[in-house]
Image (cartoon, helix red, strand yellow):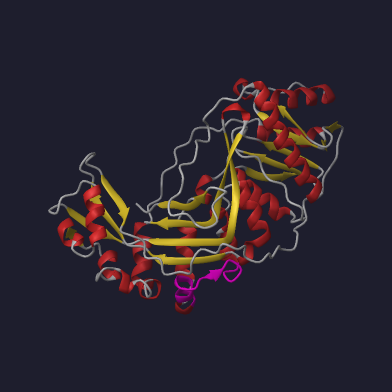
Amino acid sequence: MTSMFLMMTSLMLSQSGPPAQSPELPSYYPHVATPEELTTIYRDWEEALRKICDTEGIAAMVFDIEPTYQHVEPWTKRYGAEAMRLLGYGAKRRWVQIDGVQVFTRVGFDYRATRSTETLLALLAGLDEESLKRLSSEGLSLGDLGSMGDAMLPYLAWDPAMAKILLDRGPNVQVQAQFAPQFAYRDPKTGRVVTDQLGFVDTGPPWSQSNVPSQPREPVPYEPHRPGPLDFGPGKVMTLREFKAKAQAVFGTVYEIDARLMTAPVFVRGSMSKETFEKVYQEVASAQHPVEIRPVSQDDLLRELLETKAGSLAQDAKDKLWGLSPDDFIQGKTMTVGELAKLDPSISEYMESLGLSPSDQVQLKPGVIFTFDAGGTRTIGFANAGGKRIYYGASNRIRLGIR
């Protein structure tokens, strides 16, 4: 089954360059905040979303916030509706406009849109040979890729800080695709078949420590706002219970809610009519129904793609495959660990660390690694005990592997 994995370089803020090894990041949920701590967290969210609305000229917003997650960072330029789309991806929220109200809700957010390999594979399949050679060597910009570059933005907006960077530099973000040798083996401890990377054949330019040039897009206008008697002013964080209570008082209508969602926090700004409120309330006060999501196997698509594109994609990697050819990986050549270990001392050491013996068999497999580079670093904050946040610097170079 084809899968995607993330390799993202992170570094402490005091570091001046790309680190050799990423520090272990704290958990998103290490601590249940006290009421006093929540006051501080809600204030941060409230201030940030107010500033975004002021900058963008947004009259009304309802944002389903997550107290333990990094609050969004405001920006100073107006980007229009594109900003809301990327903000939704970064905050893992589904974004819709309802009568001019910008609504963000976790219910119905399509995580597969930011994890599916189909778009990335379709990109490779649609490129001509010359473009593919450039993509695998010096790289192309998202702007060079046109609409396909736009389709890749959800993969990059991993957090609100990265979404903010993409707003300013999106078309100039550099992207590369490189052949990635993989191997499958049976784990001696669990008995399960595991696929792992066989080194990394990096044929692209080094990480850019400086920011890529800014190139914001022309702002896309928002839907016109329809004001109404239910008014929340410049914006405030409240519970869903408080949200519906104010609507009940204004409209004289009783609204039901799942009791488990009563204390869920939302940021609410601006005014709306009864009709608009009811449509917005339906979005943010609904619970996600349990559904089965079956992963789609794209092994055949990856193999077919590499069979036709391997010559262009792996041109710079051929002399770095330890004497093996791209076809050995595409066709799934089987070797013993002993045979593979003879190719390079580092391979031998790695196989030993996995608990594999020289007589164990492994199967070579193909893969592709995409590298996206916006240049420079960003700051990521994680909730911590005591209502504080631990801040890390993270490289704006992100790698996504398909195998």
Residue 315 seen: yes
Using the rendered view, name the quadrant where residue 317 is placed: bottom left
Q: Is residue 254 above or below residue 227?
A: above
Q: Is residue 315 above or below residue 186?
A: below
Quadrant for the C terminus, please. bottom left
Name the side, left or right, on which 136 lies relative to 255: left
**In the image, residue 91 lies at what x, y percent?**
61, 43
**In the image, residue 177 lies at what x, y percent?**
45, 66
**In the image, residue 213 lies at what x, y percent?**
66, 66
Q: Is residue 145 magenta?
A: yes
Name the side, left or right, on which 186 lies relative to 390: left
Q: Is residue 320 above or below residue 346?
A: below
Residue 99 seen: no
Residue interval drawn in magenta: 131-146
**In the image, residue 283 lies at what x, y percent?**
66, 36
Name the side, left or right, on which 85 lies relative to 403: right
Q: 46 or 129, which is in the foreground?
A: 46
Q: Is residue 290 magenta?
A: no
The residue sitting at 62% across, 22% down in the picture is 34
Q: 342 or 251, which is in the foreground?
A: 342
Using the rendered view, name the quadrant where residue 65 is placed: top right
Q: In the displayed orientation, state which residue is furthest to the right.
A: 229
Q: In the displayed orientation, state which residue is furthest to the bottom.
A: 130
Q: 299 or 209, which is in the foreground?
A: 209
Using the rendered view, name the quadrant where residue 242 is placed: top right
